[in-house]
Image: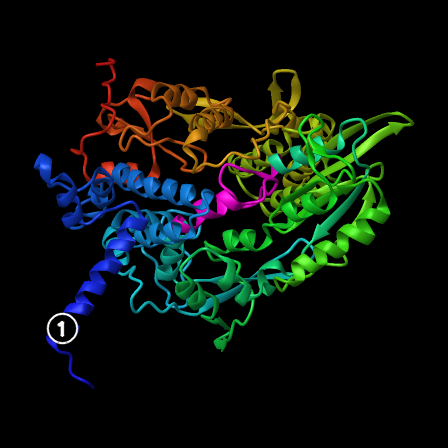
Amino acid sequence: MPSCNGTDRARLISGSINNLQRKLADVGLVTYREKSRRTSSKGVTQMTAKQNNVDAAPDRNVGWHQINWAKCHQETRKLQVRIAKAVKEGNTRKAKALQWLLTHSYSAKVVAVKRVTENAGKRTPGVDGEVWSTPAAKLAGTRSLNRRGYQPLPLRRVYIPKSNGKLRPLGIPAMKDRAMQALHLLALEPAAETTADKNSYGFRPERSTHDAVEQVFKSLAQKGCAEWILEGDIKGCFDHINHDWMLNNILTDTQVLKKWLKSGVIDEGKLFPTNEGTPQGGIISPVLANLVLDGLQPLLEERFGTWSRKQNQYIKNKVNFVRYADDFVITGTSKELLEDQVKPLVKDFLASRGLELSEEKTKVTHVVEGFDFLGQNIRKYGKGKKKWLLVKPSHKNVKTFLSHMRTTIKANATAKVENLIGLLNPKIRGWSDYHKHVVAKKTFNEVDNQIWHAIYRWARRRHPNKGGKWVAKTYFGKRGNQNWAFRAEVMKDGRVQEKFLRRCDETPIKRHVKIIKEANPYDPSFGIYFEERQGVKLAANLTGRRKLLAIWERQKGHCPVCGLKITTVTKWHLHSLVRKVDGGSDRTSNLYLLHPNCHRQHHSNPLQRWVQPALSEDGV
């Protein structure tokens, strides 16, 4: 190896400093020397405010429950907002530099570990069998999230049943790989939200199936709207995405992304290579799939027409596009337009990404015949010029729900009545809540009738030697206008109380307010809009639970420990300021809603000061 003299060494050092200065300039930072030079006349030598904000990470030596979560979330959010702004301005170089800064930030790392250790799959291990269930393991996991030397483990293959009887393969990453994906997702999601198709609603923050259904309704309900629909479904979307396309087109750390894509999968003890697709089961996979499918809506706009803000649809060919994950709907003026022009264009778009349409699920339908989309049936009724569009729960969805309810009832033939009601009520509430935004009142009554008959047969089978009157007196009672309400008597606080089976028709029908399609949660200009929308959503979620709603309103929707919003996404735990064993009551003045992690953090360190001071039971 040739020797390096003093001149060469100085040149190398000078080049390294220049490269560092350029990187700092990309993210809006300057070096100490440059800042001192600019402010020498004023005698100011501190770093810029932006660098202070970025470097103001919490102490890395504190315990897991002593971490300042509010500060971590704030620092992470600041960088995410800057990434979204850079992408919106088309400054890819600056966006990449900010992503690098975020993925090396301690604040983002602890937020990523917090996410994967609190979600539904937190107890599901990967191939190494590890889960991070203790504070020490979470801190150790945070320290292990380093790009240098990182090599993901193979995925663990598991299968879950699909609605058509087939099995869906999932790839479960190891816990460290999940945390690394969550970390890079923090940097990728702002860019994905900024460039996403406006009418894409699947696996995106603040968007839901209800928004997608409402957009379809708006595209078909008005007079003069399109009457032909192309129902599209992508064959094995997650399993066949082209790796080269992702590496060349997705704004993320391509070296880390390539390692995830090529990590392999272990199925029944054997290692298999992964040459295509992104595994279902990875926390970052839905966003990667969305990025692959984004771009179809602008392509259709360019080819078939421009947007009419007054009519809320594309004029000329009336081509409208709505997508939820890999299911999409495209409207058009005629069957020939959709089959001969639109469908070939969609096929070519997907082929460039290694994907293809599922021929068995992709078809062209007239709106009078109706079609199913996301569990709802969308169809126009009436004759001649007097037609109206109605959205109802689909027959298939209702049949599946009732089958599941009957199976649950039969499987608990010897269970206590209160336990059976405890199993059924959350299912009934969840299903009816999903369909409460459509024309579902009649369907709710029919479903309630079917569930009641299943319950009555369950009660008669338990007592074959008893008569109908005895069964009615033992298991049913009066509740409001309902004379045959399935009930159980339970002891609570030393008193006998009745617990009733919930009915679907108790859920009020309320029209869903669709999100503004341009709204971006990482754009500060939409901050007030999302705050108001989240407040309405959580208030509706707590309707019927007056005590929780009163507590949430008293706290102004914030967690008193960290000061951050309590939403349907973050979830909450109910905390008693004075424990019942210490004489505390169930009055709202003694109860607080905390984030799950904040609740654990408080109990591990009861002396920690809350962001919002707690009131005593007498209001002081």
Query: Where is residue 484 drawn, in percent x and y?
Result: 66, 24
Considering only vertical position in the picture, is 530 above or below 236? above
Magenta highlight on residue 525: no
Considering only vertical position in the picture, is 24 above or below 586? below
Magenta highlight on residue 192: yes
Q: Number of callouts in the render?
A: 1
Q: Identify the coloring.
A: rainbow
Residue closer to the observer: 516 or 94: 94
Over which residues does the magenta segment extend?
A: 186-210
Query: Where is residue 568 drawn, in percent x and y?
Result: 45, 34
Query: Residue 469, located in which quarter of the rendered image?
Result: top right
Residue farthest to the bottom, as pictured? 1
Q: Which residue is mark 1?
A: 7
User: What's the residue at 30%, 52% (across, down)?
Assistant: 101
Tell me the element at label 1: helix
Res. 8 in view: yes
Residue closer to the observer: 455 or 450: 450
Q: Which class describes the residues within 10 Å of circle 1: few (<14), some (14-19), or many (20+)?
A: few
